[in-house]
Amino acid sequence: KQEVTQIPAALSVPEGENLVLNCSFTDSAIYNLQWFRQDPGKGLTSLLLIQSSQREQTSGRLNASLDKSSGRSTLYIAASQPGDSATYLCAATDNYGQNFVFGPGTRLSVLP
Amino acid sequence: DAEITQSPRHKITETGRQVTLACHQTWNHNNMFWYRQDLGHGLRLIHYSYGVQDTNKGEVSDGYSVSRSNTEDLPLTLESAASSQTSVYFCASSPGNTQPQHFGDGTRLSIL
């Protein structure tokens, strides 16, 4: 059964810093992995989706990488801004579909 | 703009009652999902559908049912509400297994 963990649980950084959020999964036979952000009291916003055949995806200041063999994905945020403050969730499929297993999230605070 | 909407946004009900949460998307997506989010458990998959007349059980499906009679809607029914089903419920959709999932804003359900 797929299990997903995220480190750290919480992170506080000053504005302008580059940062890395980590996601680990136990079953390397994933179909894809998706990163989301969640603002308090809100739904999830899709950030990046990485297919199992891909190594990374980029969108603006965000870059997500995938290493299936080690069971890891990282989300890199460049030049962080206070508006980036949110909880970041990764989710990995446990079969050849979209049945996501979510990690517990990393709560990010970017201080002005 | 196409969107995914959940209703109601908040609901309070009593144990033993039947409750139905609505999810409607205007993207014409094939895949639709229901999740619940709880402190300490994160997001967990309840049921999912890959098309009309297709429904499948997720990790925490006991006490819940869904039906897919058209592309746009996937209502979630709690047959006999229990206090353990107090949670925030999220609906999501995607065009297919290689595409990102997009989430609604959630329904906060309290069962007294």
Image (tube, rainbow, N blue to C red):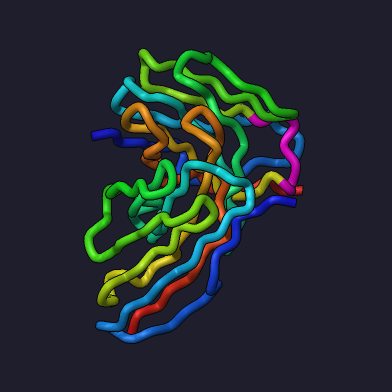
* Left or right side of A46 for B70: left
- Determine which quarter of the picture holds residue B74: bottom left
- Viewer can see residue B31: yes
From the viewer's perspective, is residue B30 above or below residue A53? below
Name above or below for residue B110 compared with residue A90. Answer: below
Residue B101 screen position, x and y as percent: 53, 41
Q: Residue at x 27, y 71 (%)?
A: B84
Q: Nearer the viewer, residue A95 or A3?
A: A95
Q: Position of residue A81 (x, y in %)?
A: 75, 42
Q: Quadrant of the N terminus of chain A?
A: top left
Span shown in magenta: A77-83
Residue B75 percent across, percent down from the top left: 43, 63
Q: Vertically, is B99 above or below A40?
A: above
Left or right: B30, with A111 as reference point: left
| Residue B24 on image: x %, y % | 55, 59
Q: Examine the rendering and report whether any part of residue A108 can be seen.
A: no
Say which of A8 and B41 sits in front.
B41
Q: Nearer the viewer, residue B3 or A31?
A: B3
> Is residue A82 located in the magenta-colored stretch of the structure?
yes
Quadrant hosting residue B21? bottom left
